[in-house]
Amino acid sequence: NRASGSGSNAEAIMNWAKNSQQAEVVCVISDKKKARVLERATFNNIPALNVTKKKEESREDFDKKIIKLLIDYNPDLIILAGYMKILTEHFVKRFEKRIINIHPSLLPDFPGMDGYGEAFRAQVKTSGCTVHYVDSGVDTGEIIAQQSFDLIPGESFEDFKARGLNLENHFYPIVIEKLIRDFY
């Protein structure tokens, strides 16, 4: 599990995995030293690893450090949860069809950084989230599953985004479980 942010999706996955017969979170890696997700992993007795990119370090060299760690932990899936960096082509090819991400829009609409914000500003009638395989593009990988929710007329952006994040927290573990069942 790789994360940069608060870690609510990562925490939802950790909580789901605790009760799963098929899955285990083998480590959590973050590129932010003080990311809350690292605290959440430690609380759940999961190795919490911080890998910080040095200014002079290339993206390729940074990803190679993470690849080394992942090889040590040997995950079947690499689950991105709030990881806000684009992975290098080398990284993606090394773990092809084993890296998944959740995105806050119904792709292909609103790829990139602000899916809920763009959807809300466009006043779409329906928004949602997408779980997809990661490729070397930005939110362009093969779609695995999507879940939608309707915009409530007059709701605030904060409420809209909170409903989306709540949906993600419930949906992502369900999709991961299905992937594991189908794959193994």
Image (cartoon, rainbow, N blue to C red):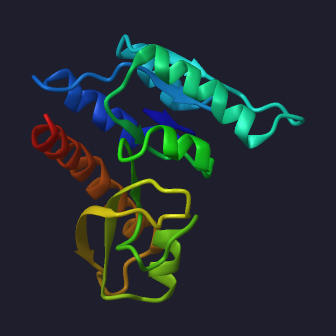
Q: Residue at x 48, y 77 (%)?
A: 110
Q: Position of residue 139 (x, y in %)?
A: 48, 64
Would you say 85 lies left or right of 12 here?
A: right
Would you say 114 lies left or right of 97 here?
A: right
Q: Position of residue 73 (x, y in %)?
A: 42, 16
Q: Residue at x 42, y 45 (%)?
A: 96
Would you say 13 lies left or right of 93 here?
A: left
Relative to 29, residue 56 above or below: below
Q: Position of residue 184 (x, y in %)?
A: 13, 33
Q: Quadrant of the N terminus?
A: top left
Q: Residue furthest right?
A: 56
Q: Nearer the viewer, residue 27 or 33?
A: 27
Q: Nearer the viewer, residue 181 or 152?
A: 181
Q: Nearer the viewer, residue 168 or 85?
A: 85
Relative to 119, residue 96 above or below: above
Relative to 85, residue 47 above or below: above
Q: Residue at x 13, y 24 (%)?
A: 19
Q: Position of residue 77 (x, y in %)?
A: 34, 35
Q: Residue furthest top?
A: 45
Q: Residue at x 50, y 71 (%)?
A: 111
Instruction: Say how many tags the image has.
Output: 0
Would you say 6 lies left or right of 33 here?
A: left
Q: Quadrant of residue 78?
A: top left
